[in-house]
Amino acid sequence: MLECSNMKLIEHSNQNQQVESLSHLACAHCDLIQSLPKMKLGETARCIRCNNVLYRNQKNSLNRSLAFAITGLILFVISNLFPLLSLKAMGLTQEGTLFATSLSLLQADRPFLGLLIFLTTIVFPLTTLLGTIYVLIQVKMNRINKYTAPLFRFLRSTDVWGMLEIFMLAVLVSVVKLGDLADVIFGVSLYSFCLLILSLSLLSSSLNPHDVWNKLRIVKGCQL
Amino acid sequence: MKNKPTTARLQGLIACHFCHTLSEFPKVTENTKKGELRCPCCQSIIHSRIPDSLNRTWALLIAAIILYVPANTLPIMTVILWGNGQPDTILSGVIHLFDGGMWPLALLIFIASIFIPILKLIILVGLLLSVQLKSTWKPKDRTILYRITEFIGRWSMVDVFVIAILVALVQFGNTASVSPGLGALSFAAVIILTMFAAHTFDPRLIWDIIDDQIGNEKD
């Protein structure tokens, strides 16, 4: 159970500019200041007032996340090299890669739609993977520079714009839709794409942003 | 009556959105308009509440509601088979799938493209109105509704992706091809605008009303 903090917090804050944040934190959705209990690995602390997730205590978060991010990057490259799906009809075969979906919208005079697909299926997933690997390696090697915190902040705020798992659902819908019109052939990339979705979701569930921020804070001399 | 809740705002503190550091709100509040406040630990711009949250959310939401009309009336894609083009709107696409016996698919597209966007627009309008009318009705449930809208909104993109995949794959000249319509563009704009609207809405505003009321009762 979480408990409400008391007035000691205020006295503390008057002495120093910042209040130590890890024992006390304000819920992002209802602003209630709460103190975190001692948590076991794998436990999640929720806000007593609005049930928002306050803190997740993952086992070995940084190492696991780094492993999943590197796996994801390799799978991302493979997924982009070969066609995801091919369509065979009337003796013709049409191959579709991930990049071709955005390109075809550009060619069909819908540049904004093409750009949107390009950003959500290629640019943001790639920056998430590359950026996470970069930040985690810096944190692990204790080589944090002034760009680490802004980069990690950018990664956290653009997290929702990588939409590969939604694209996967769209691939399944398309396969069913096209099934009775033509022969749909699964490409090599489709298998690596499935594994990519798996590693991306494992990455987001294993990465504990607090662990990274804690390291960034210590280096900046902010830990009180 | 319960104890007075200890929120960061009532304590004169600002929580950083990213690293969760609590810093003291500057004494001179008049100057804050000019300079942004930054978190002392991670240099992120911090604010007690999202600035102009209600106005910005209304603006984005109204834009989304306006674009929702062309999104549903204009064709999202045209399937050309043997030279004959058949334009489909979102709703007619669902009906065709249903008639073709693919009802699980029809249900999926119906939920993602019709049910979720409408639900999202209604919830966001309701949340904005409830905050502006200073409602104290079930704050926890309203916060949960907010979390649902925030989480579920991006899944509406599935129809846009399906169109993109069909356009890329079905390219057999005059015998069979698919071209994207203006409806798809409006629909994508609706999803993006509502995603931004959910992002600019500050759920803490729901609780501020309750906190202030409890504070007043105590005084």
Image (spheres, coloured by chain):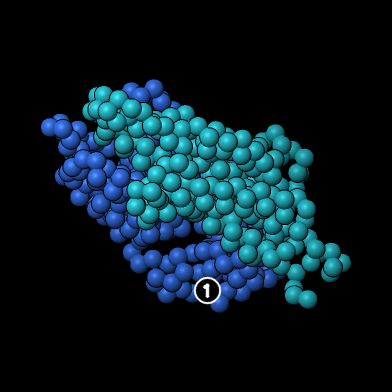
Q: Where, quadrant-wise, is the C terminus of chain B in this rendering?
A: bottom right
Residue kind at label 1, given as amino acid type: Pro
Q: Is residue A45 left or right of residue A97?
A: right
For image coordinates 77% across by 56% down, the residue present is B134
A140 above or below A110? below
On screen, residue B4 above or below B87: below
Q: Is residue B204 left or right of residue A105?
A: right
Name the image quarter holding the N terminus of chain B. bottom right
Q: According to the rendering, which colour does chain B have?
A: cyan
State how many labels appear. 1
Residue name at image x 57 percent, y 67 percent? A51
Q: Residue at x 25, y 52 (%)?
A: A194
Q: Is residue B161 visible?
A: yes
Residue B42, percent from left and from top = 51, 47
The residue at which mark 1 appears reads as A37
Query: Which residue sits at x=50%, y=32%?
Result: B74
Quick one: SS at disc 1? Answer: loop
Q: Nearer the viewer, residue A95 or A56?
A: A95
